Image: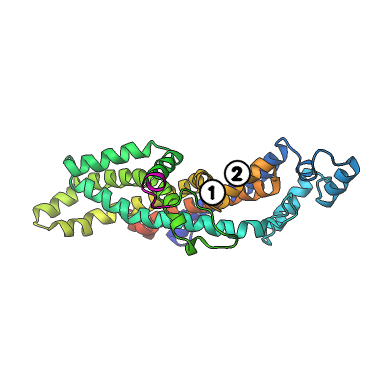
């Protein structure tokens, strides 16, 4: 294959991701259609007459074959039309604010994750085998095995119930932005951050420790290079590709973790909407949300690959060293 080395390396990943997205859209549509429950009955109630049920089913297009409806649904995706919910509202409008709120939550968590995990991982590796390393590595090992909802419960108990510093739930006035009430963001962000921070710190610490024991660093050390030079010239170039990849992969985990965290705090994001839609049997909304979550995860994985290629000279130039 000819072309720029970056494109040659990423083209297979992009093709695979697009194929997976198409497959995901089909599985999501058919799978949700196969779930028990009827959106028409849920909307009209058990006392609705058969004529009224048939009328609404025809109005919503549910009386046509599944493949026909899937084709129309996919065609609508290209125009930003995700269909209509069982309540008659456009799904795109229902998701617009929710997607922004969830992206804000994950964005703040990733923004804090990057510098904290890099600093802690480098510090633990630099002090490997000593007290600071044991504290950081031990704390990360403990936190990485704890699910987000357990961390969320502990944070609520400490900061909302005991200290009364922050709200236990993240309820907002209708139409209000979380940025206008930043206190509602603190506990959900911390709940996502702690588990992700533990994993990222452990990976960065392992990569930095392996680099510090390598021959290149030993040569610089014997040449009298100060610690800052070792970090800048040897450790950071080796660690950053790994760090960026783990940050983006952790961001993918934030997307899944946000479903639980948003439900725990009542935060108005797509996770909270997904749980509510599953409970009420609002299948068009469930289909759209699962597709959005899957597309976000695939996009994050492609970005992780792109970041690794751009930060690794031999991959970026296509010249093996």
Residue 99 locus on image (x, y percent) = 56, 57
In this rendering, position of residue 178 left or right of residue 71: left
The residue that disc 2 covers is: 275
Q: Which mark is residue 67?
A: none
Which of the two residues, 313 or 275, is positioned nearer the viewer here? 275
At which x and y percent is residue 188?
45, 50
Along the horizontal axis of the image, is 219 left or right of 193?
left
Mark 1 vs mark 2: give the one in front. Answer: 1
Q: Secondary structure at mark 1?
A: loop
User: Could you classify mark 1 by the number of other residues whose Cα lies within 10 Å: few (under 14), some (14-19), or many (20 or more)?
Assistant: some
Q: Are marks 1 and 2 in contact (CB under 8 Å)?
A: no
Q: Earlier in the sequence, mark 1 or mark 2?
A: 1
Q: Nearer the viewer, residue 288 or 76?
A: 288
SS for callout 2: helix
Taking the spot 19% from the left edge, 44% from the top edge, the residue there is 132
Q: Farthest residue in the bottom direction?
A: 180
Residue 277, quarter of the rendered image: top right
Position of 178 relative to 301 (above/below): below
C-alpha separation, residue under disc 1 versus residue under disc 2: 11 Å
Q: Is residue 303 visible?
A: no
Mark 2 Cα shell of 10 Å, populated few (<14), some (14-19), many (≥20) = some
**Is residue 160 among the parts visible in the rendering?**
yes
Q: Position of residue 94 (x, y in %)?
A: 65, 57
Residue 133 in the image: state x and y as whole percent. Answer: 21, 42
**Magenta run includes residue 307:** no
Instruction: Tell me the residue at 8%/57% (across/down).
Output: 224
**Which mark identifies residue 266?**
1
User: What are the residue bounds of the magenta stretch?
Assistant: 159-166
Say which quarter of the image contains residue 263.
top right
């Amino acid at each position: 294959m000819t072309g720029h080395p970056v494109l040659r390396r990423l083209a297979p990943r992009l093709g695979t991701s697009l194929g997976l997205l198409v497959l995901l859209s089909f599985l999501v549509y058919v799978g949700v259609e196969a779930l028990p429950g009827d959106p028409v009955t849920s909307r009209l109630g058990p006392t609705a007459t058969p004529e009224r049920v048939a009328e609404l089913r025809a109005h919503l297009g549910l009386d046509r074959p599944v493949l026909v409806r899937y084709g129309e649904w996919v065609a609508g995706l290209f125009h930003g039309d995700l269909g209509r919910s069982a309540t008659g509202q456009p799904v795109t409008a229902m998701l617009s604010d929710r997607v922004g709120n969830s992206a804000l939550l994950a964005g703040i968590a990733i923004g804090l994750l990057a510098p904290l995990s890099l600093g802690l991982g480098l510090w633990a590796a630099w002090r490997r085998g000593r007290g600071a390393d044991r504290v950081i590595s031990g704390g990360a090992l403990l936190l990485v095995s704890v699910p987000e909802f357990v961390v969320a419960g502990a944070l609520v108990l400490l900061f909302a119930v005991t200290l009364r510093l922050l709200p236990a739930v993240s309820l907002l006035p209708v139409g209000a932005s979380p940025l206008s009430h930043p206190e509602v963001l603190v506990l959900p962000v911390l709940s996502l951050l702690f588990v992700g921070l533990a994993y990222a710190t452990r990976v960065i610490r392992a990569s930095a420790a392996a680099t510090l024991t390598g021959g290149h660093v030993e040569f610089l050390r014997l040449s009298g290079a100060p610690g800052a030079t070792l970090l800048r010239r040897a450790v950071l170039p080796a660690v950053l590709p790994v760090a960026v990849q783990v940050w983006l992969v952790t961001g993918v985990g934030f997307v899944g973790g946000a479903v639980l965290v948003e439900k725990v705090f009542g935060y108005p994001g797509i996770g909270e909407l997904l749980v509510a839609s599953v409970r009420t049997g609002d299948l068009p909304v469930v289909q759209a949300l699962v597709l959005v979550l899957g597309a976000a995860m695939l996009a994050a994985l492609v970005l992780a690959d792109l970041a690794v290629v751009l930060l690794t000279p031999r991959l970026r130039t296509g010249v093996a060293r």
